[in-house]
Image (cartoon, grey):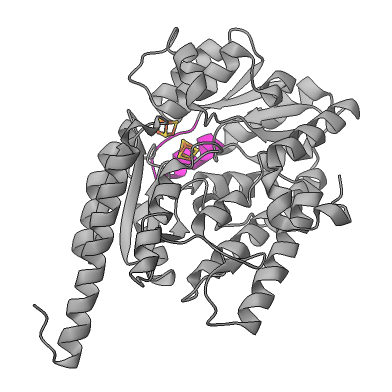
Amino acid sequence: MSCSRETSDPQAWFGRMVQNCLDYAQAGKAAGRPVVGILCEYAPRELILAAGGIPVCLCGGDADLIPAAEAHLPANLCPLIKSTYGYHLRKQNPLLEMADLVVAETTCDGKKKMFELLAETRPTHLLELPQKENDDDALEHWTRELRLFKAALESRFQVAITDDRIRSAIAVMNRERALRRALAELMKVEQPPLTGRQLLGFKSLISGIPADHEQYEAALQLFVGRLAREPHAASCLGGQRAEVGSGESEARGLRPVRVLLTGVPLVHGAERVMDIIETHGGLVVCQENCTGLKPILEDVDIKAPDPLRALAEKYYRLPCSVKTRNGARQTLLRRLAGEYRAECVIELIWQACHTYAIESFQIRRLAEEELDLPYLRIETDYSPSDSARIAVRVEALFEMVRSRDAKQAAASSGRCLP
Ligand code: SF4
Ligand code: SF4
């Protein structure tokens, strides 16, 4: 698939992302390529690409599929798991219906047990993720798991996955990560040329689509060019002003508050909290989570003598809350808060996500006591029923940031504020 002239607007291209992915998967299937579903950033897409496969993200972001899932799963379970399982039961995700294999993983308990049910009717390969951070034995075990996964792909799809094929796939994924990273880094400037929500839209359910890479490049050219021409211009995209901040904030002449968003991933269809933040006075300058920077910050060493081991090392270092301890996430947050000049931290937790919920105690402590940044924890699911309450809490957080700012500015100028 290549992008034509009529689709040379990157935002329009990614606005049709789901249809693009369906077209790409259907064409790939017709050409004999297997479709392999993944539900986690620990799943190494490079091995799927090296097997000639199409790696497809199957995480569900639709609230409407949750009631169906609750016929089998407990109601008190993460909405991401329930939505994904609802798609499975209802057979409503065409990409899942096309999948020749689903890659499951032992990450959180909810996903792990849901995969057992899904595996009753769909071909599944389970990756066992050991969970001790910085542990040599754990990394050895994970490397063995990837070797088993490679063997399973070779046997199922009758292909030899050579080191050269793995290196070619690493090159593709390194390029994709570099392009997405460069786009995300545009948010470091004082007045970014796009909103966090627009940045979140530059993504794909399928990795390694050449036309997506062309569009990432086009988007970069567009925004970098705009920044060079108008370094102090207000946020805008495609000639239109980006919708940052609520009407009320804008009417009061308030600048958007820079937000570091952390916690669970905002999978396709579940972007509601990001929308609330950015329509009530915030600008998400950095997403640390799995739909943001976390999985794309580190590349794989393409020159490593054993490319599979290099893959294992890169993926094992991903700092997810399913690890124990998960100190690398705090190191990453320290770094990102500084680089993106965050003014506050908002942590999103899907209901019944125990690992992120418990880890939030450490993240709040890091934000408030070490980084001296106001912190807000939002625990919710896919239902819009609490949107108004979340908006009130987000606005209160931004008011706190602004009044702190004003006090600091007054103190440094020797003025008194009431
Ligand atoms: S948050 Fe953890 S379990 Fe979820 S996709 Fe990321 S790495 Fe996987
Ligand atoms: S958000 Fe939490 S509970 Fe849900 S799938 Fe991810 S790690 Fe598991």
Q: Is residue 12 left or right of residue 242?
A: right
Q: In which quarter of the view is residue 321 placed?
A: top left
Q: Is residue 307 left or right of residue 362?
A: right
Q: Is residue 139 magenta?
A: yes
Q: Is residue 53 magenta?
A: no
In the depicted structure, whether residue 28 falls above or below residue 84: below
The quadrant of the picture occupied by the N terminus is top right
Q: In which quarter of the view is residue 399 placed?
A: bottom left
Q: Residue 138: percent from the left, percent from the top?
A: 46, 38
Q: Nearer the viewer, residue 298 or 167?
A: 298
Q: Residue 101: percent from the left, percent from the top?
A: 69, 22
Q: In which quarter of the view is residue 331 placed?
A: bottom left
- Residue 328 visible in the picture: no
In the depicted structure, whether residue 330 falls above or below residue 389: below
Q: Which residues are magenta?
A: 129-142
- Residue 37 visible in the picture: yes
Q: Residue 401: percent from the left, percent from the top?
A: 25, 66
At 72% from the left and 57% from the top, the residue drawn is: 10
At 58% from the left and 19% from the top, the residue drawn is: 87
Q: Is residue 3 left or right of residue 415?
A: right
At 25% from the left and 49% from the top, the residue drawn is: 393
In the depicted structure, whether residue 264 falls above or below residue 230: above
The quadrant of the picture occupied by the C terminus is bottom left
Q: Residue 390: percent from the left, percent from the top?
A: 30, 44
Q: Nearer the viewer, residue 117 or 186?
A: 186
Q: Nearer the viewer, residue 81 or 13?
A: 13
